[in-house]
């Protein structure tokens, strides 16, 4: 097992602990201390994600092909990967889905003018900012995809006697690091445009999706004897 495999397992365990803390914290804090505690938990979770990408960047520089192979992930997880990780625009599908579910569950209260303060209670301004960020993210995704395609188109150069292998590998590392930077920036910018309560709910459902896909993928691998 590589050092990044070990790191990833430990990192997931710590993320699970943070999610449990988020889930048990008061969603609508009534005191300044409770509000600060909630903000602190959100900041800790975001720092934890940043730590993952720092470690992954270092691992990519050591062995970029191992990062693409992702032996720590299930077959299902790898099938969903976009440039060695999740597609950044997945964040927006998650926001819209969760917002729709919560809106429908609270529609009677909302029609009565009661505010829930959760992801089902996004303001028009928040929806506009989410939509704008989604458009920006799609453009960046496409640009990075094009960069990877160019790298792949030049794969035959790797077989040439004059090929600069280190330079080609360095370019691939750069593509993955750009993709990871977009992943982290997308989550950060979404969290910034949400209220603290909404950010907590978003981080919980995002982690639950990650854990759910992982559990199901590992179970499928076990059944196939992988």
Image (cartoon, helix red, strand yellow):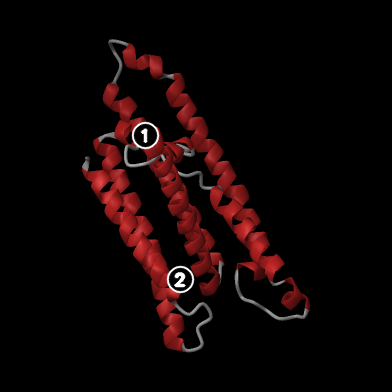
Residue, x 27% and y 55% (percent of image)?
A: 10
Q: Is residue 141 above or below residue 210?
A: above
State the residue position of label 1. 68
Dot in front, 2 or 1: 2
Could you say which quadrant of the image residue 94 lies in?
bottom right
- Residue 78 percent coordinates (x, y): 43, 37
Q: Where residue 115 appears, x then y in whole percent? A: 67, 79
Quadrant assignment for the C terminus: top left
Find numbered disc 2 in the image and state the secondary structure of the residue it sits on.
Answer: helix
Nearest the eye: 93 or 132 = 93
Check disc 2 and report the residue beneath it.
23
* Relative to 123, 204 lies left or right: left
SS of the residue under disc 1: helix
Q: Indicate left or right for 80 with 221 as reference.
A: right
Q: Around disc 1, counting alpha carbons within 10 Å, would you say few (fewer than 14), some (14 to 19), or many (20 or more)?
A: some
Q: Residue at x 41, y 46 (%)?
A: 180
Q: Is residue 205 visible?
A: yes
Residue at far right of view: 111
Q: Relative to 69, say whether 58 is above or below.
A: below
The percent coordinates of residue 147 (x first, y second) are 47, 31
């Amino acid at each position: 097992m590589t050092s990044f495999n070990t790191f990833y397992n430990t990192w997931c365990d710590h993320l699970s602990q943070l999610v449990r803390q988020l889930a048990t914290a008061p969603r609508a804090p009534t005191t300044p201390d409770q509000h600060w505690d909630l903000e602190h938990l959100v900041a800790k979770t975001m720092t934890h994600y940043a730590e993952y990408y720092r470690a992954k960047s270092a691992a990519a520089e050591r062995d970029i092909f191992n990062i693409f192979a992702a032996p720590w992930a299930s077959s299902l997880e790898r099938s969903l990967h976009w440039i060695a990780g999740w597609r950044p625009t997945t964040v927006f599908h998650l926001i819209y889905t969760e917002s729709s579910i919560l809106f429908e569950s609270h529609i009677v209260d909302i029609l009565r003018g009661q505010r829930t303060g959760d992801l089902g209670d996004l303001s028009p301004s928040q929806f506009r900012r989410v939509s704008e960020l989604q458009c920006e993210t799609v453009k960046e995704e496409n640009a990075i995809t094009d960069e990877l395609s160019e790298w792949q188109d030049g794969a035959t150069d790797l077989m040439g006697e004059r090929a600069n292998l280190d330079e080609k590998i360095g370019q691939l590392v750069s593509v993955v690091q750009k993709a990871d930077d977009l992943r982290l920036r997308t989550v950060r910018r979404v969290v910034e445009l949400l209220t603290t309560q909404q950010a907590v709910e978003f981080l919980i459902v995002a982690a639950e999706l990650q854990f759910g896909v992982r559990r199901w993928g590992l179970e499928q691998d076990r059944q196939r004897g992988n």
